[in-house]
Image (cartoon, helix red, strand yellow):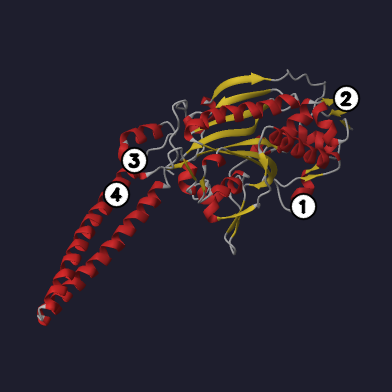
Amino acid sequence: MLTLKMLRDDPKGIVEKLKIKNFDAQPIVDKVLELDTRRRNFQTEADALLATQKQKAAEIGALMKQGLKDQAEKAKEAVAVLKARSAELLTKMDEAASEMERNLVLMPNVPCSLVKPGAGAEDNEVVKMGGPEVKLPEGALPHWELAKKYDIIDFDLGVKITGAGFPVYKGKGAKLQRALINFFLDCNTAAGYKEVEPPVMVNSDSGFGTGQLPDKEGQMYHAEVDDFYMVPTAEVPVTNIFRDVILTADQIPQRLTAYTPCFRREAGSYGKDVRGLNRLHQFDKVEIVRVEKPEDSYRALDEMVAHVESIVNKLGLKYRILRLCGGDMSFTSAITYDFELWSAAQGRWLEISSVSNFETYQSNRLHCRYRDENGKTQLAHTLNGSSLALPRVVAALLEDNQTPDGIVIPEILRPYTGFDVID
């Protein structure tokens, strides 16, 4: 969430920067500043009334000592009127502050200077490509056909049990899922991330803290009786570990990793984008989360991007890294790098990871702070990244490694799967 101070200090700058995200912030900025002026005027009047009340209280004491009871009673009546007005002003101040907050949460994060303008995905910048060229055998199949051929993923059975977007993994398909989860977690812990296992349901405060609420409420599965939300990503529960926390100097930075199933409605998704594993309502993902000092967060972002790249390289898959333009960025991000894998069988790129720096946007909502070397409390920077999301990794692994004799498992995964080939 943007702070009131940011809007006070540079309202025009905020409006101009948010234009990069194709967001017109001017009406909200004007409203917030008007409410701030109103609240401060109420505060000024309330302070003046309090000073008058103190003065009247002293007068009442003096009058009572002089035996002027009638005058003292009149002074008490005047004080009662002042107190009533003070209470009214405090209510108005609270109402103005609440309305300010309701407006502030409607504004997305300000993109950093590296982010370019753009309408959408077509304007994203490719910053790097890597991995081997994919040579498919004659008669190569997309992953949903391979899944059926080798009986490793049953999409129809998932529809029967739950609905579309909830596949059932079977046999070597289930083992491949488990292998990838363990492999990703091992890569992350070897890089210094501490593994945690968080809940997969969160309360509304947690959803608000990381920016999913109110922005993405319609995309989250909601258990209304308990007011719990199924997690759309492990980012939500893991980052909320630091909600209302002040970290000491020796506790920052924080590096955590977690595996969770993830749940997303993905409303409005149709056509080829949803075939097979391309877009699911329930899927597995391993996440990395960092909490950093502001001066260290962009170095940390570069480290996270390099780390995710190293995992993709170990799998031997063709990939590209994109820096998202303003029009394709999330509501909460200051900058995002996406990783995509090439699906030769589908002839398209598949997103498998987003690595983002949120700067202070989440930490302001979370009240996630740290004490600097001078003992002053500061807002931390939060970052997170997929490391990695499984469905499209599995899709690319199946498609790119298919042979006439079966699907060859990358060597790095064989100690985890216990088999070399799906046949």
Residue 265 at least partly seen: no
SS of the residue under disc 4: helix
In the rendered image, the quadrant that contains the C terminus is top right
Q: Which residue is mark 4?
A: 36
**Precedes in sequence: disc 3 or disc 2:** 3
Residue 61's disc number = none
Residue 355 vs 70, above or below: the answer is above
**Residue 179 appears at what percent x and percent y?**
79, 38
Residue 404's disc number = 2
Q: Are marks 3 and 2 in contact (CB under 8 Å)?
A: no
**Residue 306 appears at what percent x and percent y?**
63, 26
Q: Which residue is mark 1?
A: 160
**How far apart are the two marked residues, 3 and 4, measured between alpha carbons?**
10 Å
Q: Amino acid at mark 1?
A: Lys
- Using residue 201 as the reference point, say whether residue 174 is left or right of it: right
**How far apart are the two marked residues, 4 and 1, measured between alpha carbons?**
55 Å
**How far apart are the two marked residues, 3 and 2, measured between alpha carbons?**
62 Å
**Precedes in sequence: disc 3 or disc 4:** 3
Foreground disc of the pair 2, 1: 2
Q: Are marks 4 and 1 in contact (CB under 8 Å)?
A: no
**How far apart are the two marked residues, 4 and 2, measured between alpha carbons?**
69 Å
Q: Are marks 3 and 4 in contact (CB under 8 Å)?
A: yes
Q: Residue furthest front?
A: 65
**Residue 257 appears at what percent x and percent y?**
66, 40
Foreground disc of the pair 3, 1: 3
Q: Which residue is mark 3?
A: 7
Residue at 50% in and 51% down: 244
